[in-house]
Image (cartoon, rainbow, N blue to C red):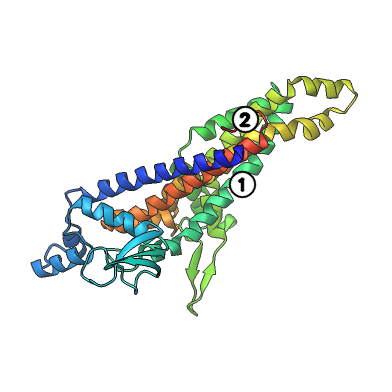
Amino acid sequence: MQLLQFIAKRLFNGLLVMFGVIVVIFVLFNVLPVNSARMTLGQRADTASVEAIEREFRLNLPWYHRLLLYFNDISPLSLNNQKNEDAPSHLNPDEVSFTSLFAIGEISVVAKAPYLGKSFQTRRKVSEVLGEKIYPTFMLAISAMLLASVIGIILGIIAAIKQYSIWDNAILVMSTFGISQPAYFSGIILAMVFGYYLSDWTGLNVRGSLTDIDYTGEVITIWKNLWLPMIALGVRPVAIITQLTRSSMLDVLNQDYIRTARAKGLSYYSVVFKHALRNALNPVVTSISGWLAALLTGAFFIEKVFDYKGLGLQTIESLLSFDFPVVMGSVLFVAFVFVVMNIFTDILYSILDPRVTVK
């Protein structure tokens, strides 16, 4: 029961965070002195065309009215004016799939998936635009996280069991250097060295996406284009996980039960890997579980450097073209991942570490 209350509290806090993010993002992109309709059609568009676009995207309404409608669009339970197609709260069945639950006059309460609106530029649903880009970015973030976790934990263990040795000092220097490097700087260096100067030996490209379309029209995966972005994105997490693992291992190795295990005659490496490592990895594992969302945001810069066609590059291009619905949808998706991963991390940490009190 206590754990369920803890989860319910975290979920409620997550909903409050998402509410705040939605309000801030909507106000930020809808109070700007930018005529989105004219930017969509071009500066030479006639007044009638601009007004038609404003009606289509509800830009002719006050921003606070549009904010309420935006909440109605992204909410799983929404109000739908089913009889008046010109009403702002009318959901177009061709764009939004929904199930009517009950009606109150002309207004019906419907259940649906969150609707993020349409792109200003392509008129496609934002969910479709972003859905095509999530897979490459997700693969980039997952692979970078796995790379950072494996290498970081191994280096951290070596540094802890070889404390004050040349190995420990070298690993600390490298991890400090890695923490200080921005992801985009690492990406530029890797692209220049391994994708340009040494490309004949590495076979890697300076720029390229994970997926492409071949001459038959089918989507193919080009795995070699994942290596350099993955390493560039994983440099800083490797350094942080290394230092976190080292610090946690040293703290556990100084505990009384470790000294007791040694006094019983167990071998040093048996004590380290069977007793110390399990407890030392608890904070490391929970830290790693929260890195996925952070790597999604870091991928924005990496994708621009390598022209890696994922969620980050799509967001940057949409921002430059004033395609605000796509930008807002991307930001909300990343915020949602952040909230979910933080809730998951809190729950995981309370389960793995018995010293944590569930409140």
* Near-viewer residue (59 or 19): 19
Mark-to-mark CA distance, 1 and 2: 29 Å
Image coordinates of residue 132 in percent, x first then y, are 44, 64
Query: At numbered mark 1, what does the secondary structure look like: helix, strand or loop?
Result: helix
Q: Residue at x 26, y 50 (%)?
A: 29
Q: Is residue 318 shown to the viewer in this render? A: no
Label at residue 117: none
Residue matched to label 2: 356
Q: Label 2 amino acid?
A: Val
Q: Residue placed farthest to the left in the image? A: 47
Relative side of 210 to 319, left or right: right
The disc, 1 or 2, on the residue closer to the chain's N-terminal end is 1
Residue matched to label 1: 147
Image coordinates of residue 355 in percent, x first then y, are 66, 28
Q: Mark 1 packing: few (<14 Cα in 10 Å), some, or many (20+)?
A: some
Residue 256 vertical position relative to residue 130 in the rendered view, above or below = above
Quadrant of the image for the N terminus? top right
Across the whole image, how many numbered discs are drawn on residues?
2
* Near-viewer residue (162 or 88): 88
Relative side of 282 to 228, left or right: right
Quadrant of the image for the C terminus? top right
Quarter of image, res 3: top right
Q: Label 1 amino acid?
A: Leu
Image coordinates of residue 313 in percent, x first then y, are 39, 55
Query: At numbered mark 2, what does the secondary structure look like: helix, strand or loop?
Result: loop
Q: Residue at x 63, y 42 (%)?
A: 149
